Amino acid sequence: MILAKVVAVVGAMKRLIFDGAHENRNVQLSQVLSVSAWADAIEVSTQRRAKSQVYRVANPFIWRAFVEALAEGRITRRQSSGTDDQS
């Protein structure tokens, strides 16, 4: 199990970066096949690897839904209009 935290969604939401104590991992969202929630982690299966990767995260059920939605394209990046609504 990789003790990691998700530090970024990069490049207009094309990949996730997991920042671990010993190494970092990148996961291409287009390569995600499935995401499973464990008690304290998520398991990510991708097209590029024979074995799933397990990442310890806080709130794994929320992360599972988030990664699935990103991989399926249900979450998109909001473009700023360039104006600020604060007065």
Image: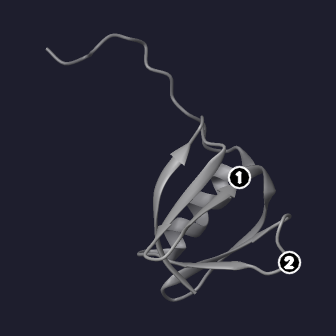
In the image, 39 versus 49, the foreground residue is 49
Label 2: which residue? Answer: 50
Q: Is residue 49 above or below residue 74?
A: below
In the image, 4 versus 72, the foreground residue is 4
In the image, 14 versus 72, the foreground residue is 14
The quadrant where residue 68 appears = bottom right
The quadrant where residue 74 appears = top right
Q: Position of residue 46 (x, y in %)?
A: 79, 66
Q: Secondary structure at mark 2?
A: loop
Q: Position of residue 19 (x, y in %)?
A: 47, 65
Q: Nearer the viewer, mark 1 or mark 2?
A: 2
Colour scheme in the image?
Answer: one colour
The dot on residue 29 is 1
Q: Secondary structure at mark 1?
A: helix
Q: Is residue 80 above or below residue 3?
A: above
Q: Residue furthest left?
A: 87
Q: Is residue 33 left or right of residue 42?
A: right
Amino acid at the residue labelled 2: Ala
Q: Residues within 10 Å of mark 2 (few under 14, many from 20)?
A: few
Image quadrant in which the C terminus is located: top left
